[in-house]
Amino acid sequence: MDFYYLPGSAPCRAVQMTAAAVGVELNLKLTNLMAGEHMKPEFLKLNPQHTIPTLVDNGHVVWESYAIVLYLVEKYGKDDALYPKDPKVRSVVNQRLFFDIGTLYKNIIGIIMLVFKKEQPTDEQMEKLKQAIDLLEGFVTERPYAAADQLTVADICLLGSVTGLEWLKHDLQPYPHIRAWVSRVTAEIPDYAEFRKELEEATKAYIASKK
């Protein structure tokens, strides 16, 4: 299946890690936003919202990273471990996903975009980011994983956001449970070293472009 993505993107990385977890191979199609590749007619035909990531599975097109993640686990997961069917457990997984997109990732990407524009975040923005990270620390203090007693899509998506903090050189030293959780989750994701390498290369390329 074709996967339109951009290296270094947390939402794209979450999809790639989910695909690895369910054993699906993606045909990676690098999409250069700066060159306007997402605005080409052929891409707009697939996704009129012209966003990445975008997945095309045998003619079926899905975009928005969480929609793709859930599609992959529901269609290709060998069981329901990554997205439990139990309503109570799934409600916690869903809550963590909504927390990520509406709070944690929202605050991280907001500050990253300011950094890209060489602007400084306000004290209020940094405080909101701290509050979001504090909440995650609490989640992974209550249990070994973010939403259940085993790895779920909530962990994968949240991990994508947390690794995005590296663009900001944000210190996670005050958060021992998050650091332990990161080690625990990354150990369970197949080929995580490759995702890690991609993130590091994207970060280095960005830094080099700003010199």
Image (cartoon, rainbow, N blue to C red):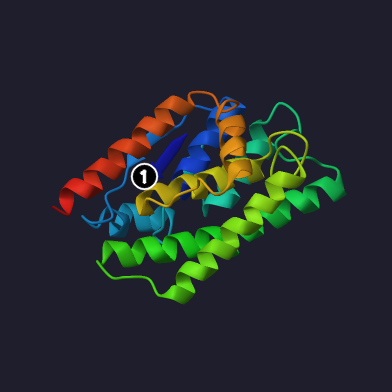
Count every numbered label the image shows and give the total: 1
The answer to whether residue 107 is visible is: yes
Direction front: furthest residue: 174
Q: Secondary structure at mark 1?
A: loop
Q: What residue is at 32 percent from the left and 52 percent from the top?
A: 42
- Label 1 CA crowd tier, 10 Å (few <14, some 14–19, many 20+): many
**Towards the viewer: 73 or 134:** 134
**Towards the viewer: 126 or 24:** 126
Q: Where residue 49 sits: x, y (%)? A: 43, 63
Q: Quadrant of residue 189?
A: top right
Left or right: 7, with 161 as reference point: left
Left or right: 89, with 159 as reference point: right
Q: What residue is at 39 percent from the left and 44 percent from the top?
A: 4
The answer to whether residue 97 is visible is: no
Q: Residue flagged by tag 1: what amino acid is it?
A: Gly
**Towards the viewer: 82 or 200:** 200
Q: Quadrant of residue 69?
A: top right
Q: Quadrant of residue 84?
A: top right
Q: Where residue 203 sits: x, y (%)? A: 30, 44
Instruction: Please say if 116 is above or below 190.
Output: below
**Towards the viewer: 86 or 167:** 167
Left or right: 39, with 179 as reference point: left
Q: Where residue 121 sits: x, y (%)? A: 37, 71
Q: Where residue 153 sits: x, y (%)? A: 65, 42
Q: Which residue is mark 1?
A: 8
